[in-house]
Amino acid sequence: MCNMPLLEVENLNVHLGTNHILRDVNFSISRGESLAIIGPNGAGKTILLKVLLELVPYSGKALWEKGIKVGYVPQKIEADRQIPLTVWNLLDAKAKTIGSERKEVRDVAKSVGIAEHTLRTELRHISGGQFQRVLIAFALLGKPDIILFDEPTASIDEQGEEQVYEVIHRLQDELNIAVIVVSHDLSFVYRHATSVLCLNKHGLCFGRPDQVLTPEKLTELYSAPFGYYHHIHENNHGH
Amino acid sequence: MATNELYSLILAILTAGAAGVVGSFALMKKMSLAGDVVAHLALPGLGAALLWKINPLVGAAATLLLGTLLIWQLEKRSSLQTDTSIGVIFTAALAVGALLTPKEELIEALFGGFAKLSLFGFSLGVLGVFAIVATTLALRNRLILNIFSPELAKSAGVSVHLTNLIYLLVFALTILLGLQFLGAILVGALIIVPAAIGRELAKTFPQFLTISAIAGALSVVLGYAISQIYGLDLGPVVVAVSAALFGITLFRKKS
């Protein structure tokens, strides 16, 4: 590998109470790369992202390159979208908190395809796809080197899904931002990910998608004893 | 109107305005009812102070502060929601307060009155209102992020617990100021009702804060006028007026 990794994870373990949530997870990601994390529900994918954000205690190594700025797009926001807050109000709140200029709000909004009139719209009046763009814009404020996406398309329709993936792909191409994407969508993994981590409590595989995603591996990943499939939040699932 | 009555009226109007601003965030944090509950925390201190013949507000402030810190700790350590942790403390506080407060003072402690303020008391109160509004506005962006998503707030470098503590302290100070003229039972209305009006009418966040503040202040002005004309108690009239204003906003929206 020619460049230093942005993030190196070695023998990472997470215990919550008596539960051993993650076991000996190993992977790394470098600048401009795109890592997909796949695995059944309950495999610890979201927890892994939270470890990387230092929201959850862990043992082992999760080492960021010095001075790295990390953006985060969560799977689900428990926010009350009924509050009288426009898209601008929300993005501006972050910009002011981190000391960015107003211009940056307009720039990031533009880069993820949020129209000027959408900025003035209340959060409760925008679609799921637009809301996802708002969250990406939120993560982009402060010029992060890497963005962590937790199932970025979980709550939106197929068309919106494609657009969100396009936005993510563009971030990599144009801004050279590394991304880690938790995704159920294997077509995304094959098309856009430079590497993939199969996770089911422990890391089952890590490497280039075309090399490590063998049918055997996928079967093992999705049929491991603790990997039973729950669909609580999604009504229909395309695969 | 005597000067000290005017002082009281002006302070009541300012307090109600500040409560509108503080209440707007309480509404977004889904802790609207906490105003009612936190107010009860003042009761044991108030009762004890009356027993020992010291300034009741000092006693009230002491137990409010204690209760607020306790709530903050509970919120920080357990996964309980703010509302739930407050609920645990306040029932005990209300019981102790009712036992301590002398019978003849209990009604005023619960439903408020119209104290005549000295210039010193007035100045202190105005300073308090200024502190409440200035702190809340300075904190507003962090609060918005905190409310929107604590995780995203953390990712933006916001200290979630510290922000919560400062907000809770400002919240308690608002209750303390409102306590004088609305009493422990009614003061919660200052937190809830103006903010509810603001939410109904506002389209943007600055509008939300402004309308809530105006609705609070207007309730006191109209409430004072009505209570003077009909010789009624100020506290209940103010709350009834604010509730009526809320009713009108609902009606307006549908028509």
Image: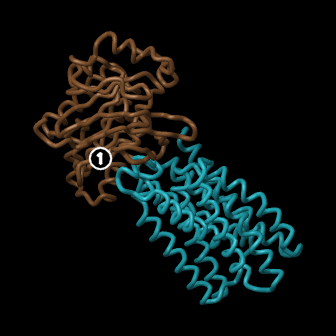
Chain colours: A brown, B cyan
Q: Residue at x 14, y 34 (%)?
A: A173
- A219 shown above or below B183: above
Q: Residue at x 56, y 67 (%)?
A: B169
Instruction: Say whether residue A169 is left or right of residue A74.
Output: left
Mark 1 belongs to which subunit?
Answer: A
Q: State the residue lying farthest toward the left.
A: A2
- A91 shown above or below B134: above
**Could you tell me which secondary element the residue under label 1 belongs to?**
strand
Report how many numbered discs are placed on residues in the image.
1
Given residues B156 and B205, the one toward you in this image is B156
Instruction: Tell me which amino acid carries mark 1.
Output: Leu
Q: Residue at x 57, y 51 (%)?
A: B196
Q: State the residue lying farthest toward the top.
A: A215
- Quick one: quadrant of the C terminus of chain A? top left
Instruction: Say whether residue A12 is left or right of residue B125.
Output: left
Q: Residue at x 25, y 57 (%)?
A: A100
- A233 shown above or below A132: above
Counting from the top left corner in percent of width and height, residue A163 is at 26, 26
Counting from the top left corner in percent of width and height, residue A22 is at 44, 34
Quadrant of the image occupied by residue A48: top left
Identify the residue under disc 1: A63
